[in-house]
Structures are given as structure tokens and as C-alpha cells.
Image (spheres, grey):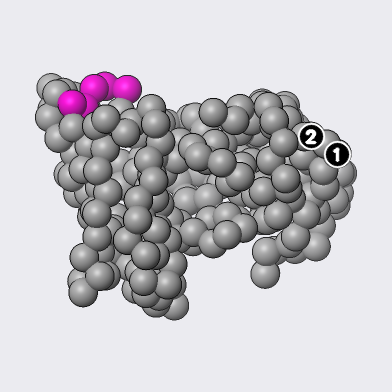
Amino acid sequence: QVQLKESGPGLVQPSETLSLTCTVSGFSLTSYSVSWVRQPSGKGPEWMGRMWYDGDTAYNSALKSRLSISRDTSKNQVFLKMNSLQTDDTGTYYCTRDQTEGIDYWGQGVMVTVSS
Amino acid sequence: DIQMTQSPASLSASLGETVTIECLASEDIYSNLAWYQQKPGKSPQLLIYDASSLQDGVPSRFSGSESGTQYSLEINSLQSEDAATYFCQQHHDYPFTFGSGTKLEIK
């Protein structure tokens, strides 16, 4: 069955870089696009960016200068790196499988706290 | 960026009632709208796609509709398990944007 699982540090120091990994199973990264979406506690989600099935990427312009999304298809993994983290980057980070009609699967999410 | 204005922020309704949640897009999104349900501590789940198509496995008491740039999610015959937060999302143009959410309480 389709699964996505995020992994990475739960605590990041201000000004440092966040690195997250999304490991997928049950589908191929060369057939489906994967996005990163984050959600501050008690707020609506924010789409961060996408790794297209063909290897192309798209980013939220508000984050583009700090964000990088890459993948390793041999390991079924998609990576997120975001630098210069601040406290308002605190929240739950999800990777998602995208269909043309929306997100059909979400990972369980990983809580990231930016704090010294 | 396309703004999705979602209302109400919260509502309370009784078992068996019907409720409607709305999202107003700041420009035409050509029915490229999805609705998600999120229960506390869980990931969102897709309910409706393409504004009005029911995702497989979702009860038929959920339905979506549109009128111009206004999109609606209707839940009929409310059940206790419908207590959750609901979000809309446009996927017509980057960056894909979400509504701020509607928290539904079942009395």
C-alpha cells in the first residue's frame, strides 16, 4: 500500500538548516509527484514545494530563496533542505503524494521546533 | 498568490444536521479545488477533488459544489465521527494555497 514517512530532527537551532527525508513505498517517484507541506500548530497548511515525477521542481516563492527539494529514486526518497530557520518555521512538516486533482496521500508528519 | 478565504472558522452542529463550509477564491481556479478533513493529531485526508468529485471510500453524505469562485463543502446527516477541521486547497496555480480551516464540533 501507499506510504510516506518523514524523518529528521525534531529540534533545530535558529539560523540553522533543516534537513528532512521522505521515504515512500507502494509507488514510484518517477510516476508520481511529491510535495512538502507544513502546518503551524492550530493553523492552515502551507504548500512549500514539489518534486515532479520527471525530476523538475517547483517552489513556493515565499520560501524559494531558502528551500531546496531533491530526490534519490534508487532509495525512494525525497529530501527537503531549508536554511536560515526562524521560530515561525516551527510546525509539522508533511510529505504528500500528489495527483492532478489534489493530494491523495499524506505522511504522518514530523514535528519541527525551532528554538535555542 | 491566490487567496482562499474560508468560512466559518468554527461551527457547532447537532447529530443529523446539515452544515456547509465555504471557500472563496481570489480569482478563477477552474474547479481545481480539493477538500480535506483533519482529525486531532492526524494527517489530513482527501474528501473531495475537482470541486465536486467524491474520493473513493468517503461517505456520500459529503458533497462539494461551486458557484463562480465560491466553493462549498456540505455534510449531511452529521455523525459524531465528522468532528474535525476541514480545509480547502486550490491546485490551479503555484503556490498551491489552503484555506485557514473550519473546526466542526458535534453537539
In this orientation, does residue A78 appear?
yes
Label 2 crowd bin: few (<14), some (14–19), many (20+), radius 10 Å: some
The subunit carrying tag 1 is B
State which quadrant residue A96 falls in.
bottom left
Q: Nearer the viewer, residue B73 or B4?
A: B4
Residue B70 — which label? Answer: 2
Element type at mark 1: strand
Q: Residue at x 35, y 56 (%)?
A: A56
The subunit carrying tag 2 is B
How many numbered marks, from 0 up?
2
Q: Is residue A85 magenta?
A: yes
Residue B67 — which label? Answer: 1
In this orientation, does residue B6 appear?
no
Amino acid marked by disc 1: Ser
Q: Position of residue B26 (x, y in %)?
A: 68, 27
Element type at mark 2: strand
Is B69 above or below relative to A54? above
Residues under numbered marks 2 and 1 in contact, where contact means CB atoms less than 8 Å apart: yes
Q: What residue range appears in magenta?
A: A84-88
Amino acid marked by disc 2: Gln
Q: Residue at x 31, y 47 (%)?
A: A110
Tell me if B89 is positioned left or right of A109 in this view.
right
Image quadrant where one finds the C terminus of chain A: top left
Q: Position of residue A5 (x, y in %)?
A: 32, 60
Q: Nearer the viewer, residue B46 or A75?
A: A75
Q: Nearer the viewer, residue A85 or A1?
A: A85
Q: Residue at x 61, y 45 (%)?
A: B92
Residue B6 — which label? Answer: none
Mark-to-mark CA distance, 2 and 1 = 5 Å
Image quadrant where one finds the N terminus of chain A: bottom left
Q: Nearer the viewer, residue B62 or A73?
A: A73
